[in-house]
Amino acid sequence: MSDYQHLRIKEWALEDRPREKLLAKGIQSLSDAELLAILIGSGSQKESAVDLAKKILKDTSFNLIELGKVSINQLKSTYHGIGEAKAITIVSALELGRRRKFSESIIRSKITSSRDVFYQFQPSIGDLPHEEFWILLLNRSNKIISRLKLSQGGISGTVIDVRLIMKNAIENLATSIILCHNHPSGNLQPSEADLAITKKLKESGNILDIPVLDHIIVTDHGYYSFADEGLI
């Protein structure tokens, strides 16, 4: 592609234009940079949309998970040619991809291990830049009745309402609960606050005969299970 470095995409050979290439050869033929360039639409006088896309990907180590952590303001302030509309388009597309992964994961409707819980939540919260706390409500067969987001916080924590969790469990006729939250820092080890809220929820669940089966901490590369570690 070096021969086209100073040419606009419209001046490239037909087979090298991302949109035309997609139509002619299929979406699988496009690189990540070419797909991102389609979202960007146009570059600047100094570089094409593909060149700009390559620069963005290089800055995120060519890792789409890392790109998913970049904010609208970061895109706008860092890259010449990326305004608010283009930044919103990029962030929206990556969020749509995250939600697609979640839609695929809910097929695993029966929970048999901590890894099943990880598969449920990692696609949707594993790479978020902020912390979220979710619960899985299960029936007697350990099949998922519902999954609910209870709270959303900052980088270092979120606020949990024990009464709200138990209220949701009772209203949905759940017979057990699994807790899950993410650590944006990537650290899988539970904090003192994690240990305290797990203990409090376990005690509340025992009183109401709705046991807390596990608490899973999720990051973009792995998970920690309280049950597997003997903490529940």
Image (cartoon, rainbow, N blue to C red):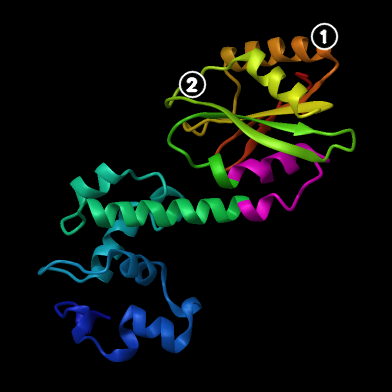
Q: What is the tally of numbered marks visible in this picture? A: 2
Q: Residue at horizontal 81%, vertical 44%? A: 110
Asked which quadrant contains residue 2, the reply is bottom left
> Split into 4 quadrants, where in the image is the N terminus?
bottom left
Region of the chain picked out in magenta, as a range: 103-122
2 relative position to 116: left or right: left
Q: Position of residue 102 (x, y in %)?
A: 61, 50
Is residue 102 shown to the viewer in this render? yes
Q: Residue at horizontal 48%, vertical 55%? A: 96
Say the numbered circle drawn on residue 80.
none
Q: Position of residue 160 (x, y in %)?
A: 57, 17
Residue that carries the numbered disc 1 in the rendered image: 207
Secondary element at tag 2: loop
Q: Position of residue 141 (x, y in %)?
A: 89, 38
Say the numbered circle drawn on residue 157.
2
Spatial CA span between label 1 and label 2? 27 Å
Secondary element at tag 1: helix
Whichever of labels 1 and 2 marks the residue nearer the N terminus, that label is 2
Amino acid beneath label 2: Gly
Asked which quadrant contains residue 165, the reply is top right
Magenta span contains residue 106: yes
Query: Which residue occupies the extreme front position in the image?
Result: 171
Q: Residue at horizontal 25%, vertical 55%? A: 85
Q: Is residue 17 above or below residue 135?
A: below
Q: Main secondary structure of the magenta part?
A: helix
Q: Is residue 94 above or below residue 154?
A: below
133 relative position to 77: left or right: right
Q: Is residue 37 above or below residue 74?
A: below
Magenta span contains residue 6: no
Q: Position of residue 184 (x, y in %)?
A: 48, 33
Q: Looking at the image, which is closer to me, 108 or 113? A: 108
